[in-house]
Amino acid sequence: MNEFLLLFRRDFKSADAPSPQDLQNAMKLWQNWLGGIAAQNKLVDTGNRLASEGKVVHAGDRISDGPYAEIKESLGGYTIIRADSLEEAAELAKGCPVTLIGGNVEVRQLVPPNL
Amino acid sequence: MSEKEILPRLFRTEYRKIIAVLCRRFGFDHVETAEDIASDTFLTAAETWGLKGLPDKPEAWLYKVASNKAVNFLRKKAIQERPIPGLTPDESTVNDWGIDLSPQNIQDSQLQMIFAICQPLLPPYSQVALALRILCGFGIDEIAGAFLSNRETITKRLQRAKDKLRENKITLGFPSDPAARLPAVLSTLYLLFNEGYYSRHSDWLVRKDLCLEAMRLTLLLTEYPDTDVPDVSALLALMCFHASRLDARIGSKGEIIRYDDQDPALWNAELIGKGNFFFNRAAQGEHAGQYHLEAAIAYWHTSKEDTAEKWDAILSLYNRLLLQRYSPVAALNRAFAISKIKGKAAGIQEAEKLKLGSYGPYHHLLGYLYSGTDNSRALFHLQQALQLSNTPADRDNIRRDMARIN
């Protein structure tokens, strides 16, 4: 089995500020979606959300704010799962709550570095 | 009850008490001696009671015989090379050889024995196995069954564990870091409780005694400030909730009656009350561990009413359990909860993703979920469940489900 990174992307700017009820509902959805993966014993790491504030370091040690100002589909969080193939991993990612609010899930295999 | 029935039952409840007290007296170094004396006591009981019938007070008889055998042993040892701590030849004139089988000493010795056995230096698996052997009087085969292992592996594991404890000169006494030891202790007590509740390994259906002993030991932990932490109360709450249904669980022919078929009037309200009490006690701080979540689920099951609120809460709890740790049982129960909320088709979808084809309860669940919509498939799964089942009680239930479809 291989491990796969699921990257959740959504449009921060176009999203309305969620109400407490929205947050509550969202939590239930995420909990159930992740729970479904965990139930199949395919969850490696529930992962994290990402704070909306960010910084980017460029060549010449230049630091800028972002990246949400420049990129429409900004990273909201990640999870790590295991699967036999990229196809299976993508299948597992189906139903992810981020897709219900116009976002998407990028699925990438983790390749251990040869350091 | 004839002496044929009572002796195995007493073995389970009294063997470990005798060992605990003897170990406390001799030191853990001599655990095998304690085991020998305890086993010997029961052998004598089997021979004597077979010939002369049951004594009036069987437990007292056992304690007296164990005590006598221990005293004989100590007398012999007093004049031999290998010393027993705290005993010199001069003490042989004293009548009291320190075999105190009073309830208080039994209690204290057992608690100390739990901590002596549940040592961080032993692998968790070995701690539980040793505890089951010495604290609970489990047979090697029964321990092997509990761990889905085999006799040789368990025997080796037990020997290695005892040797390690001896090498490290582990003695009976309360640990300096009880909090660190608690997870293993609680795991053992939970296993003990489950052994009684499900009794997969013997001809008796529910060994109520084991459940009650597990609860008693867990309660003991709440009575010492150092071990009175929320996880302990949570585990005790969980045990109380499950135990409240023990009487309703056994039918007139000794068969296991499942939750859905049980008569709530037979549920023990006092135990449910106790469960609620300890559950509240456990609700302190941020941490909601495995026992908290399972206790919460058990709490919801103390009411049979199928409300949306109940099953939403239960689904959420199983999700949280699985996010902490995968278990096939939790995965199956989650699928069942989904079927209660969204219907059997949704439940089937979730269940079939689990791919637990070599696990009997998986097929049993699918048998239930398919019944009514695809009976031939349901029967196929129930047949699989039957083949994979390893207890007569379980098989009876599956056959009953099959009969209901036909």
Image (cartoon, coloured by chain):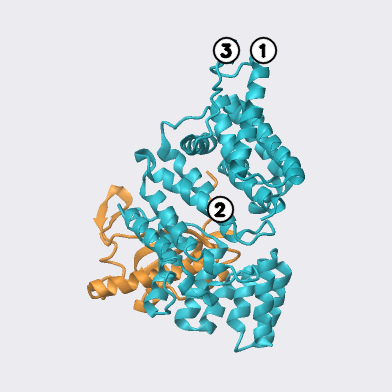
Q: CA distance from mark 2 to mark 3?
A: 39 Å
**Kind of element beneath mark 1:** loop
Query: Where, by quadrant of the figure, is residue B163 drawn?
Result: top right
Q: Nearer the viewer, residue A17 or A28?
A: A28
Left or right: A99 as drawn, with respect to B48: left
Chain letter matching colour cyan? B
First-in-chain label (2 vs 1): 1
Residue placed under numbered mark 2 in the picture = B209
Residue A94: x %, y % from top left:
48, 75
Quadrant where the N terminus of chain B sits is bottom right
Residue drawn at point x = 61 percent, y = 85 percent? B371
The local secondary structure at tag 2 comes to helix
Say above or below: B104 vs B298. above
Using a 10 Å C-alpha cutoff, classify the residue at mark 3 as few (fewer than 14 neighbours), some (14 to 19) or many (20 or more): few
Which amino acid type is shown beneath numbered disc 3? Thr
Question: What shade does chain A have?
Answer: orange
The residue at which mark 1 appears reads as B79
Kindly identify which chain the residue marked by label 1 belongs to: B
The quadrant where residue B375 appears: bottom right
**Residue B260 % position (x, y):** 52, 76
- The image position of residue A99, as x and y in percent, is 39, 76
Q: Where is residue B295 drawn, in percent x and y?
A: 42, 60
Report the Cα–Cα distance between label 2 and label 1: 40 Å
- On the same chain: label 2 and label 1? yes
Q: Earlier in the sequence, mark 1 or mark 3?
A: 1
* For the residues bearing labels 2 and 3, Cβ distance under 8 angstroms: no
| Disc sitting over residue B41 in the figure | none
Q: Which residue is mark 3?
A: B88
Answer with mark 2 or mark 3, whichever residue precedes in sequence. 3
Mark 2 neighbour class, 10 Å CA radius: few under 14, some 14 to 19, many 20 or more: some
Which amino acid does the dot numbered 2 rest on? Asp
Q: Is residue A6 above or below residue B115?
A: below
